[in-house]
Amino acid sequence: MAGNDRPVYHGGTTASATVQEQEFKSIYREYGRPLYGYVLWLTGSRAASDDILQTVFLRVWRGAAVPEEPAQRKAWLYTVCRNACLDHFRAASRGLRFRRQYALETQAPDPDARGDSLLWEMVEKLPETDRTVVHLHVRMGWSYAEVAEVLKTTENNVRVRAFRAFRKLRGAFTEKP
């Protein structure tokens, strides 16, 4: 391997830095913004989202086995982001709860989005996996099969989780005065 060559992240082969750089840029252009939105939604913190996404793409750059097939690549990237977020939560759970509460308390409500914000506040109270299912399916527009692939479960399990989460949300809305 020449001095400026870096290992490519797939198949154990090597290529020049420019080839790897082009592939990396292509992946970042396609997935960077949606992944950032997903991580931001999970963490509620722009700083944490920046750090987590940087860690994920650094892993890609350094040679992680990123699938070449687009659907598998997408699922892999979202799974890596989700796992990185879970690692972040474990490491900083006390500080994160404080920051999230502070952000909610200091954020000025948008009168037009009051119903939407109420819904997503209720979604935040759901268990973590149910929140993820609702976010990926409703906000991101993913199919149940795509969500199942990221969560490493069956499509039927995702459908059941979504049904139960929606039922909880419906119940919470009907209980409100």
Image (tube, rainbow, N blue to C red):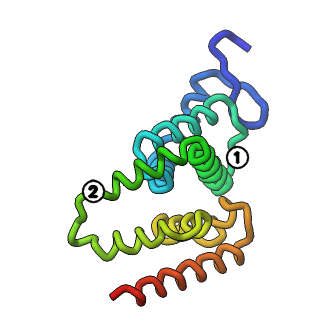
Which is more N-terminal, label 2 or label 1? 1
Residue 168 visible here: yes
Q: Secondary structure at mark 2?
A: loop
Distance from Cα at disc 1 to Cα at disc 2: 39 Å
Q: Nearer the viewer, mark 1 or mark 2?
A: 2
Residue at horizontal 66%, vertical 70%? 145
| Mark linked to residue 67 | 1
What is the three-letter code of the residue carrying label 2?
Gln
Q: Secondary structure at mark 1?
A: loop
Residue at horizontal 47%, vertical 47%? 96
Residue situated in front as seen by the camera: 29 or 47: 47
Determine whether, in the image, residue 106 is placed left or right of residue 68: left
Q: Position of residue 106 (x, y in %)?
A: 27, 54
Label 2 neighbour load within 10 Å: few <14, some 14-19, many 20+: few
What is the three-letter code of the residue carrying label 1?
Pro
Residue at horizontal 57%, vertical 35%? 55
| Mark linked to residue 113 | none
Q: Position of residue 27 (x, y in %)?
A: 55, 42
Determine whether, in the image, residue 96 is placed left or right of residue 164: left
The image shows residue 77, relative to residue 6, as above or below, that is below
Residue at horizontal 41%, vertical 53%? 100
Name the quarter where the N terminus is drawn.
top right
The image shows residue 107, relative to residue 133, as above or below, that is above
The image shows residue 159, relative to residue 33, as above or below, that is below
Determine whether, in the image, residue 7 is placed left or right of residue 36: right
| Mark linked to residue 107 | 2
Residue 73 visible here: no
